[in-house]
Amino acid sequence: MQPSITTLHGESFFRDDVLLYINRADEDYKVPMHNHDFLEIAYVAEGVGFHHIGGDVLKAQKGDLYVIPIGMPHVFRPTAGDVAKHPIAVYNCTVSTRLLDRIVPLLSDRSLAAFVSSLYCDEPRLLSLPGAGEHAEKLFYSLHREYMQLREGYADYLHTLLIQLLITVFRLTESRLNPSGTTRATPFFELLQYLDRHTGEELTLSDLAVRFTYSERQLQRLFKQHTGQTFVRYRQGRRIEKSCEWLRNPELKISAVAEYVGYKDRDTFVAVFKRYMGITPSQFRNRWRNSRSEG
C-alpha cells in the first residue's frame, strides 16, 4: 500500500518580508512523506541516513545537497529506529516561487538565470549533489544563523545568501556535467581541511607553515586571498561554528564545549562566542531548543 502524502504550503512558513524559511532538523520517523508548493534546497549537516524521494531511496550522508522540486514527495529517515545512535541532521532552505520570480531578473548571467528558472518552471527535476563541499555547508550555516538572529537588515542579507547558494548549486551542477572543467584541490585547500579536522588543537601559523612547506608570510597572504580573513580570525570563526554543533547536545556543559574547540578558559570562550554570534552560548542553546519545540 502506498503511504499517504502530506502537502506542505508555503503560507505556513514564510514571512511576507522574506519569503523563505530555514531550519536545521534532527530527522526521525515522525515527519510523514510530504510534498510542497515551494522549492526546497536541503543539505545533510551530520550523520548518515536515507532520502526517500519520488519512487527512489537514496543513501544520504554529511555533505550531500539536494534540490527538491515543487510537488515531489520526499522525506529523510535515519538508518535505524534508535535515532540517538543513528542521527541524521539536515538543513532545509525552502523558497517561495514569488521570491525566485524577483531574483531571476536581477541575475546578469543569463545561463545562471535560465538555470534558476528551470528549478521551478516548466518540468523541474530533482538535483542530487553528493559531497557538495565546505562552501555549501558554510552558506547553510550562515543562512540558519541569520534567520535565527533576526538582526537589522536580515531580510536583505538572507536574500543575498540565497543568491550565493543558487550560484553554488549552479556551479556544482555544471561541474558534474563537465568534469573536465573541474579543478584539483590546491595544497592550501588541503591545509584548510586539516585545520578544520583539528579544531581543538593549538595549531599556530608557524606549525602550518612547517607542515605544508609554506613560509609564514605566504600563509598570511593566502588566508587573506582565499578566505578574506587573517589566520587568527579564520581559526576563531571555525571554532565558534564547530561549537554551535556541540551546543546542540544539551548534556554537554559549556565548559566542555569550550575545551572541545580549543578554549581552555570558559569565560574567554563565552566572550569570543558573544562577539562572533551576538549572543552567549547559553542563549544560542536556548534558541535552538525553542526552535525545535516550535517545529
Image (tube, grey):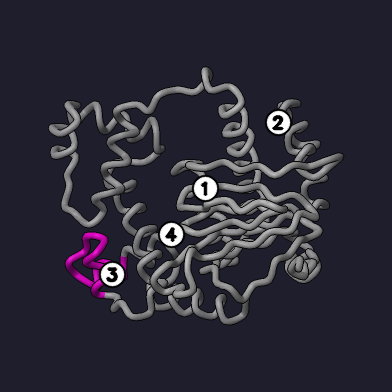
* Disc sitting over residue 14 in the figure: none
Dot 1 and dot 4 residues touching (CB under 8 Å): no
Dividing the picture into quadrants, the one containing residue 116 is top right
Kind of residue indicated by mark 4: Gly
Residue matched to label 2: 112
Residue furthest to the front in view is 1
Q: In 3D space, how far apart are the residues under numbered discs 3 and 1 (Cα atoms)?
A: 26 Å
* Disc sitting over residue 47 in the figure: 4
What residue range appears in magenta?
255-271
- Please report the residue visible at 31 percent of the width from the left and 68 percent of the height from the top: 271
Q: Which one is closest to the eye, mark 3 or mark 1? A: 1
Give the overall secondary structure of the magenta segment. helix
Tell me residue 286's x, y (percent): 46, 79
Dot 4 lies on which element?
strand
Dividing the picture into quadrants, the one containing residue 211 is top left
Q: In 3D space, how far apart are the residues under numbered discs 1 and 2 (Cα atoms)?
A: 21 Å
Q: In the rendered structure, which disc, 4 or 3, sits on the residue that comes first in sequence?
A: 4
Give left or right: position of 74 versus 80.
Answer: right
Dot 1 lies on which element?
loop
Q: Nearer the viewer, residue 61 or 193?
A: 61
Give left or right: position of 99 versus 27.
Answer: right
Q: Residues within 10 Å of mark 4 (few under 14, many from 20)?
A: some
Dot 3 lies on which element?
helix
Residue matched to label 1: 64
Kind of residue indicated by mark 3: Val
Kind of residue indicated by mark 2: Leu
